Image (cartoon, grey):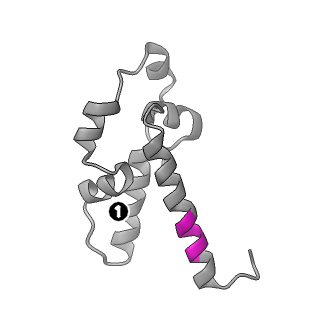
């Protein structure tokens, strides 16, 4: 990607991010704890990273607005519709959020 200009690179990265968000919205069966245990990040991490990026650029974005951008609805609504109780095995494997 070194020969791609910065604007095109940013557009490609943004398109990939939007596709990831669409994929996660469609895969409501995949729980955040599963993502954390397997990949070390989850939907909440993505929304937190959006808030961090906004803060670095002086753009006002709160946690709940970022979660709506990732989940496609308020977080509490998504939890009520899709979140299941984590199994004892999932809880045992969970080590918490990754260091940023």
Q: Residue furthest top?
A: 88
Against 1, is 31 above or below? above
Against 100, is 77 above or below? above
Residue 63 falls left or right of residue 31:
left
Q: Nearer the viewer, residue 81 or 5?
A: 81
| Disc 1 packing (10 Å; few <14; some 14–19; many ≥20) | many
Q: Which of 53 and 16 is in front in this view?
A: 16
Q: Residue at x 36, y 48 (%)?
A: 71
Against 85, is 70 above or below? below
- Main secondary structure of the magenta stretch: helix
Residue 44 falls left or right of residue 35:
left
Whole-percent x, y for residue 12 in the image: 60, 71
Q: In which quarter of the image is residue 7?
A: bottom right
Q: Which residue is drawn at 39% across and 62% down?
A: 50
Whole-percent x, y for residue 75 in the image: 27, 44
Q: Nearer the viewer, residue 40 or 9?
A: 9
Q: Which residue lies furthest to the front in this view?
A: 26
The residue labelled by disc 1 is 51
- Please report the bounds of the magenta region as a residue range: 10-15
Q: Residue at x 27, y 66 (%)?
A: 61
Whole-percent x, y for residue 57 in the image: 37, 78
Examine the structure image and report whether residue 47 is included in the region drawn in magenta.
no
Determine the secondary structure under disc 1.
helix
Whole-percent x, y for residue 6 in the image: 62, 83
Q: Residue at x 25, y 61 (%)?
A: 62
Quarter of the image with the N terminus is bottom right
- Whether residue 76 can be seen here: yes
Examine the structure image and report whether residue 11 is included in the region drawn in magenta.
yes
């Amino acid at each position: 990607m070194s020969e791609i200009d910065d604007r095109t690179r940013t557009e490609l990265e943004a398109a990939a991010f939007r596709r990831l968000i669409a994929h996660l919205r469609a895969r409501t069966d995949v729980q955040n704890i599963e993502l954390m245990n397997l990949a070390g990040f989850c939907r909440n991490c993505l929304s937190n990273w959006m808030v961090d990026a906004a803060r670095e650029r002086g753009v006002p974005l709160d946690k709940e607005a970022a979660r709506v951008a990732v989940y496609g609805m308020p977080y509490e609504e998504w939890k009520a519709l899709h979140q299941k109780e984590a199994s004892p095995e999932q809880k045992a494997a969970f080590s918490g959020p990754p260091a940023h």
